[in-house]
Image (tube, coloured by chain):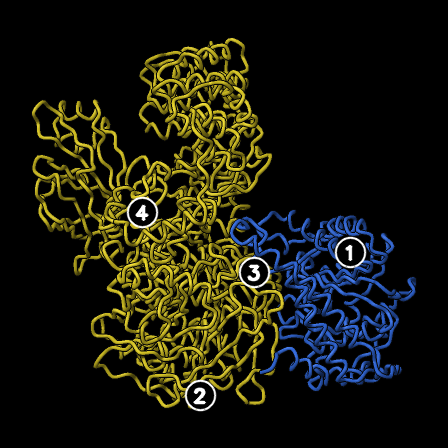
């Protein structure tokens, strides 16, 4: 510690007092709880007091209350990693406020000797503890307040990452024990129902009484928050995902690193990461907080909250003003609960360092001893009396189940469950019978208590399934699914609920049917297709169809069932999408009854799996000139894939392809795809027009490049001669580069020679040329040889060397050779620790974040291409919206200068060698049994057949080293200052407002101008004229689109310059939405192609679905200021606008 | 509380003593009629490999403590490689890799321990696949043994799964499955000339012993043994496999030794199965790989703990007595 203080002291002399208040890694925060409390900006009407602090509690990881109002806290000083010789002596500490004065006055160590306990849950006469690979149950048999007995409850949980190990222990409303695990963990658990395995993240569900363990939901990155609302709808937060609050549907998968084919998203895409979750409730809190989900933006030192509102079958989640904001870098709220007194309790892990892997495990600045529990209360509102439940008689407890406080209801359920069925059932039956039939919430408690006690009560269930309130029906459906094996006819019971008038009831019924082992369950679930299907319902139907396939597919294959009609049949077959469904699918296609909306997916599937006659249908569909171009291209690519991967070609003559290839009027993407297909089929290059296409000067570049690859693939001598010729001479240079790429597939040395020649040309694209060689085995070596003695323009050499480094990180010989030929020194020396320290020391004083944001946005910096801020920007690298608040300055500087030194979860590239000699570098985002999908440095998805992979190895970061080399030191300081300000309180924090951040603007090219001249601006905009080409732009962090950065278009001589911009938003229900503009000056506005009167506040009524808003900016009237469009909910309207990035 | 293990070891000890009287005899167990008892040699490295049954032995420590005390004059080292949920395919050890990587890891882990005596306990997890899974299980087990035999232990012992006392509806079917898998393991042992311990038969009386005054031989739900169950199984295996009677030692000394063995096993666990593998050895080792050296330092700590164990195991006055089993209790 002394070393650290010394360094800090040295820096104190350099840094201004203002900077000291900021978080700087070498600038330790004042650890006094008073100083921390003083840093809190608390929501109006609330106050915060210190409830407990070290040494009474330390490094809290999770906390949970017992039914007597004592707070159990899992505390770990061993985290992040046990050291040799260190005793694993982490603790479970029990805190209690015995005198009710609002602070804990009793702290006892219930258990020690633990190894990084990541979960704690009191219950069943003791507590459950996550202890590394195991869940233990500890109990105190002699009443001295300390555990004396332990038993392993479950074992086999993974420990690949100690901040991912099982965590977030919770009792459910159903009496089940829920817990979460995170993305790096692979668990293999033996249960009395067979082994259960989960690799990756998810939420487990466990019934201690019978040992049944199941996966309740899958996915997430690091989901340390899970709670449920008044009606048993589950919500989760993710401490490493960027989608805010997730509405958890049973059995669903959520956004993780590598995702299944389909999955659900969180409700707040583009959010910071959140830890902990509790639904606020009770009389102490003002009305506007009740029902909010409270969680922690631990990176930006905030306790935040979201209002959840029903929206179709799911919810919208809107961030509200935060409960606590702080600039104290040690304040790390990581868990949050409602307390027995109705206040909100926050566990503060207190640590200036939160990075798990990125900062050394042994970094002395990691705090190992502190920790606080803060209590948030509403000023001037009475607290609730802490309920006394332990000795209360059963009838009293039953009455307590209707308390307005969620805490009280949860604790009461737990007490009743532990009393056992014999003690509770008689009174429960009596209590339920005496309930006011209109008191649905009390009846729901009665139903849940039966579930908790594992005592089916079909009569009560059946009346609840009939309740007027859809929230109650949805809750009852969940119970019906759990009791399916105890209901006389579960499918008949659930059938009417599949077509319930409320979409969330339908959602629950669709998912409940997935667990009913009845061949008719799927057919009944698919009846939901007769009513409107929103995206969540569509996913639920997909999941149920896939999960129940073993039950329905055999009878469908035998022709004994059609699942109720062509519509449900097509839906279910395409959901499964495997070779097993091909027979029934082809029957459906041949019958002519395949509903039109399924045709694109059906054809794509047939292309992937069909036989020659099936493929013929796909080919014919691709030839239809009235079909959309991208779809025609997709079908042709599916056919090319079938030929390459399965050696299956369409039956019949392929002459029509020659027609497509040779016709100058064929749309470019279709022509290019036809060339790829022709290559895959090995068609004669001359007869099918590939030779002509490759040399046709006016043909689209994309089509010519595809033709060149097909020529190379043909192996035909004449074809290859043409490839070699064009590699030497083709114009434009993009075609020449394509020819070099094609040439490299059969003659590396010739390709390397042409690459060097081409690099000397002024218009060359160095990175594309380097990639053509470097992405092939032996390519870099050939290029190094060809560079011997060559001279390149220095700028070209610099860009080429950068490209070489990003594809071949482990070997600098190509980059060195490129530098030499440009007369440059070898690669700039990698930054040293001293370089990093010197920048860190200066950035707070000398860096200007405003200027830095403009540097961040420069096209050549490529920051936006790869990183998103609040969802706007690229997906190659991690989102940066709260990076400044979470990462210390030296980490940020180091990441810019040395991108490979620390890489975020989910952003590790892999390098794949394929059997056709290619080397591909990208982040794996999806892998199925037959396909691996990588996201490359351009953000494009590359699908690789698993069968073609010869080797895979770990890559590093996709961020090229040397990206910031062109910047001056002052610019680098500005850029770093901007990044480090992001997410900190101030102008670079993402607020709670819903603002459009992703835009498209029209590129000022010839065709765009022509469109306006031909049909007029209004007509062109209203029809989204296809001659417009669009480029994406993002707003500033403030949400404002900087007009001065946008391209402008002058359609006529002397016409005012214009900028045409557009954004997209989704609504899941019909109704008015409110758009708020900073100013309407100089704007014309269209919504879905219809003009709107421009004004600062507009309230159009929209249907459910996707919408586009086009704004034409008259640059002569408006050029300096920005353009900002915010979305607000209209009271009483069920439409909720959510801006989206168009894929 | 001082330490959890110490405390519940003490509880178990009382039960262990009780078990000497209440325990079923092992008459139901068909004794291995071909192979003579396995004799431990000075310098032996006994490696236990398998699923949760084996994994939990590293905490219970009963078999290891009994063996250590039974032949105190010999230096024998024990390594426990049990892993919950594991199978002959090494499924639970795959981490981020493919199932095949799990198998490779399993073989490498065994190899690293250089076993001279290898005790293998698989089949419990595989048995859930029922009769349909038997051919794959046989094939997998043989492939595993091909790899393990190549490591050259002088003796390999195959243990069947334990009997289970499930309350689930399918418990009858489960019993049949366990019998099938046990039979398969026995057959593989015979074919390959390895010793076999029919733990299913040894524990069947425990599973059937549901008398209200009997100890809880099983953990709740009847899938795994309780601490008492493990203590009894240790004695049964000691006799069935090694032909040894449980040494009559001072209970306090037994517990001190068992505690030392527990500590040693924990240290070895940190060595062979460290937390944060992703950062220390895996695809994020560029971040924390510099700390991987720490993990090797556990080897020295394990050696020190073993030195401690060899001090603790020597009885002041070695006294061996015959172990008595109450046939009558057993037969009821």
Q: Residue A973 carries which label?
A: 4
B230 relative to A656, above or below = below
Q: Which chain carries label 1?
A: B
**Pair 1/2: label in front:** 1
Disc 3, SS: loop
Q: Do labels 1 and 2 share a chain?
A: no
Q: How far apart are marks 3 and 4 (CA)?
A: 39 Å
Disc nearer the start of the sequence (3/2): 3
Question: Residue A1027 versus residue A244: which sits nearer the camera?
Answer: A244
Disc 3 marks which residue?
A159
Colour blue maps to chain? B
**Of the image marks 2 and 4, the number of the one nearer the N terminus:** 2
Residue at the image position 66 percent from the left and 68 percent from the top: B266
Residue A602 at x, y = what percent?
43, 36
The CA span between labels 4 and 1 is 56 Å
Real-space CA distance between mark 1 and mark 3, rounded to the nearest whole angstrom? 25 Å
Q: Nearer the viewer, mark 1 or mark 3?
A: 1
Which element is circle 1 on? Answer: loop
**Chain for mark 2?**
A
Secondary structure type for disc 4: helix
Q: Looking at the figure, which quarter contains the C terminus of chain A?
A: top left
Residue wearing tag 1 = B114
Give how far across and how far down residue A973 sits, in percent.
31, 47
Identify the residue under disc 2: A390
């Amino acid at each position: 510690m002394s070393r650290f203080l010394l360094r800090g002291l040295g820096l104190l002399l350099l840094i201004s007092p203002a900077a000291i208040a900021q978080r700087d890694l070498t600038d330790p925060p004042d650890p006094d709880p008073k100083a921390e409390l003083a840093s809190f900006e608390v929501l109006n009407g609330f106050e915060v007091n210190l409830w407990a602090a070290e040494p009474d509690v330390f490094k809290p990881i999770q906390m949970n209350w017992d039914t007597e109002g004592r707070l159990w806290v899992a505390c770990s000083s061993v985290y992040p990693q046990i050291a040799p010789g260190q005793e694993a002596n982490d603790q479970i500490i029990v805190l209690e406020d015995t005198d009710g004065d609002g602070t804990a006055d009793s702290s006892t160590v219930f258990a020690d000797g633990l190894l990084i306990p990541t979960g704690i849950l009191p219950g069943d006469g003791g507590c459950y503890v996550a202890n590394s690979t195991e869940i233990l149950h500890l109990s105190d048999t002699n009443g001295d307040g300390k555990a004396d007995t332990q038993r392993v409850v479950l074992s086999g949980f993974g420990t690949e990452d100690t901040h991912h190990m099982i965590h977030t222990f919770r009792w459910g409303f159903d009496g089940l024990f829920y817990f979460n695990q995170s993305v790096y963990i692979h668990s293999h658990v033996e249960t009395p129902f067979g082994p259960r395995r989960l690799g990756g993240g998810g939420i487990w569900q466990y019934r201690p009484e019978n040992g049944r363990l199941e996966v309740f939901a899958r996915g997430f990155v690091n989901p340390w928050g899970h709670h449920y609302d008044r009606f048993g709808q589950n919500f989760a937060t993710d401490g490493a995902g960027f989608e805010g609050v997730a509405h958890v549907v049973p059995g669903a998968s959520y956004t993780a690193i590598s995702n299944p084919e389909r999955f659900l998203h969180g409700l707040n895409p583009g959010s910071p990461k959140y830890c902990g979750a509790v639904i606020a409730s009770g009389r102490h809190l003002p009305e506007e907080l009740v029902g909010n989900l409270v969680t922690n933006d631990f990176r930006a030192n905030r306790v935040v909250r979201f209002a959840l509102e029903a929206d179709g079958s799911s919810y919208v989640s809107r961030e509200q003003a935060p409960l606590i904001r702080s600039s104290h870098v040690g304040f790390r709220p990581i868990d949050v609960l409602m307390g027995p007194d109705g206040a909100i309790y926050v566990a503060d892990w207190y640590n200036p360092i939160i990075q798990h892997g990125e900062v050394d495990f042994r970094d002395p600045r990691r705090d190992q001893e502190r920790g606080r529990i803060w209590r948030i209360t509403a000023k001037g509102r009475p607290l609730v009396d802490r309920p006394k439940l332990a000795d209360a008689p059963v009838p009293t407890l039953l009455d307590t189940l209707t308390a307005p406080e969620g805490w009280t209801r949860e604790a009461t359920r737990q007490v009743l469950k532990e009393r056992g069925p014999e003690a509770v059932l008689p009174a429960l039956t009596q209590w339920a019978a005496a309930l006011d039939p209109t008191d649905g919430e009390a009846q729901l408690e009665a139903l849940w208590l039966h579930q908790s006690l594992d005592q089916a009560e079909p009569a009560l269930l059946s009346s609840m399934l009939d309740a007027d309130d859809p929230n109650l029906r949805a809750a009852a459906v969940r119970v019906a699914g759990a009791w399916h094996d105890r209901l006389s006819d579960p499918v008949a019971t659930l059938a009417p609920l599949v077509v319930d008038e409320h979409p969330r009831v339908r959602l629950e019924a669709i998912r409940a049917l997935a667990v009913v082992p009845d061949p008719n369950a799927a057919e009944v679930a698919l009846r939901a297709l007769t009513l409107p299907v929103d995206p969540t319902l569509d996913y639920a139907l997909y999941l149920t169809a896939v999960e129940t396939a073993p039950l329905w597919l055999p009878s469908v294959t035998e022709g004994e069932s059609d699942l109720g009609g062509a519509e449900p049949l097509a839906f279910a077959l395409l959901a499964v999408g495997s070779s097993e469904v091909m027979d029934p699918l082809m029957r459906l296609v041949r019958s002519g009854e395949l509903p039109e909306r399924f045709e694109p997916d059906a054809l794509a599937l047939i292309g992937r799996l069909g036989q020659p006659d099936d493929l013929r249908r796909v080919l014919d569909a691709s030839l239809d000139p009235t079909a959309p171009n991208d779809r025609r291209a997709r079908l042709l690519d599916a056919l090319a894939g079938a030929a390459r991967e399965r050696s299956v070609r369409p039956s019949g003559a392929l002459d029509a392809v020659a027609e497509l290839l040779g016709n100058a009027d064929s749309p470019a993407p279709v022509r290019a795809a036809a060339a790829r297909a022709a290559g895959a089929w090995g068609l004669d290059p001359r007869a099918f027009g590939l030779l002509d296409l490759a040399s046709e000067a006016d043909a689209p570049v994309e089509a010519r490049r595809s033709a060149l690859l097909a020529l190379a693939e043909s192996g035909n001598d004449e074809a290859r001669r043409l490839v070699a010729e064009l590699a030497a001479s083709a114009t434009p240079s993009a075609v020449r580069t394509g020819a070099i790429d094609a040439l490299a597939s059969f003659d590396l040395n010739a390709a390397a020679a042409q690459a060097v020649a081409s690099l000397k040309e002024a218009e060359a694209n160095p990175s594309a040329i380097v990639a053509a060689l470097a992405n092939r085995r032996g390519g870099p070596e050939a290029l190094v040889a060809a560079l011997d003695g060559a001279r390149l323009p220095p700028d070209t050499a610099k860009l080429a060397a950068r490209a070489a480094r990003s594809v071949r990180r482990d070997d600098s010989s190509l980059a060195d050779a490129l530098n030499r030929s440009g007369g440059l020194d070898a690669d700039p020396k990698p930054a040293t620790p001293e370089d990093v320290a010197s920048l860190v020391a200066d950035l707070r004083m000398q860096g200007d974040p405003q200027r830095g944001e403009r540097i961040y946005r420069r096209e050549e910096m490529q920051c936006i291409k790869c990183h998103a801020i609040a969802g706007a920007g690229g997906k190659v690298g991690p989102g940066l919206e709260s990076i400044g608040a979470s990462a210390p300055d030296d980490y940020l500087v180091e990441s810019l200068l040395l991108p490979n030194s620390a890489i975020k979860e989910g952003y590790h590239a892999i390098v794949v060698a394929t059997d056709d000699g290619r080397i591909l570098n990208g982040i794996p985002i999806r892998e199925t049994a037959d396909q691996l999908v990588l996201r490359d440095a351009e953000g494009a998805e590359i699908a690789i057949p698993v069968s073609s992979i010869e080797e895979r190895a770990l890559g590093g970061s996709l961020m090229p080293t040397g990206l910031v080399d062109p910047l001056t030191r002052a610019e680098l300081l500005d850029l770093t200052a901007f990044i480090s300000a992001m997410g900190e309180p101030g102008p670079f924090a993402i607020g709670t407002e819903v603002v459009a951040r992703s835009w498209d603007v029209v590129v000022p090219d010839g065709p765009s101008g022509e469109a306006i001249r031909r049909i007029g601006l209004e007509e062109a905009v209203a029809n989204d004229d296809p001659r417009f080409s669009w480029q994406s732009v993002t707003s500033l962090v403030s949400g404002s689109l900087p007009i001065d950065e946008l391209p402008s278009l002058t359609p006529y001589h002397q016409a005012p310059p214009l900028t045409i911009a557009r954004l997209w938003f989704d609504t899941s229900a019909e109704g008015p939405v409110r758009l708020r503009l900073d100013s309407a000056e100089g704007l014309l506005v269209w919504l879905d192609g219809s003009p709107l009167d421009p004004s600062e506040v507009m309230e159009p009524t929209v249907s459910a679905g996707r919408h586009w808003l086009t704004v034409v900016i008259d640059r002569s009237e408006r050029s300096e200021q920005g353009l900002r469009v915010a979305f607000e909910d209209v009271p009483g309207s069920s439409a909720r606008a959510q801006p989206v990035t168009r894929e | 509380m001082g330490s959890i293990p110490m405390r519940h070891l003490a509880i178990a000890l009382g039960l262990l003593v009780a078990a000497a009287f209440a325990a079923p005899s092992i008459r139901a167990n068909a004794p291995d009629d071909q192979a003579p008892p396995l004799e431990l040699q000075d310098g032996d490295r006994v490696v236990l490999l398998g699923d949760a049954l084996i994994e939990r032995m590293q905490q219970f420590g009963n078999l290891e403590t009994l063996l250590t005390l039974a032949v105190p004059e010999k230096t024998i080292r024990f390594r426990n490689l049990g892993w919950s949920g594991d199978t002959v395919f090494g499924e639970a050890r795959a981490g981020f890799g493919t199932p095949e990587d799990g198998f490779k890891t399993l073989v490498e882990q065994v190899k690293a321990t250089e076993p001279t005596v290898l005790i293998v306990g698989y089949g419990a997890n595989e048995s859930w696949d029922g009769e349909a899974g038997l051919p794959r299980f046989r094939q997998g087990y043989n492939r595993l043994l091909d790899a393990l035999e190549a490591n050259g232990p002088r003796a390999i012992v195959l243990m069947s799964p334990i009997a289970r006392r499930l309350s689930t509806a399918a418990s009858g079917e489960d019993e049949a499955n366990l019998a099938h898998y046990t039979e398969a393991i026995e057959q593989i042992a015979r074919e390959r000339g390895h010793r076999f311990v029919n733990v299913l038969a040894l524990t069947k009386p425990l599973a059937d012993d549901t008398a209200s005054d009997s100890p809880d031989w099983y953990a709740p739900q009847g899938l795994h043994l309780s601490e008492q169950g493990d203590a009894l199984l240790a004695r049964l295996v000691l006799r069935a496999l090694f032909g040894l009677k449980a040494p009559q030692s001072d209970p306090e000394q037994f517990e001190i030794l068992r505690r030392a063995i527990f500590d040693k096993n924990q240290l070895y666990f940190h060595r062979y199965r460290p937390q944060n593998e992703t950062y220390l050895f895996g695809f994020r080792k560029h971040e924390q790989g510099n700390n991987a050296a720490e993990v090797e330092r556990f080897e020295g700590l394990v050696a020190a703990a073993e030195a401690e164990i060899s001090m603790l195991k020597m009885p002041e006055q070695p006294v061996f007595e015959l172990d008595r089993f109450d046939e009558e209790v057993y037969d009821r």
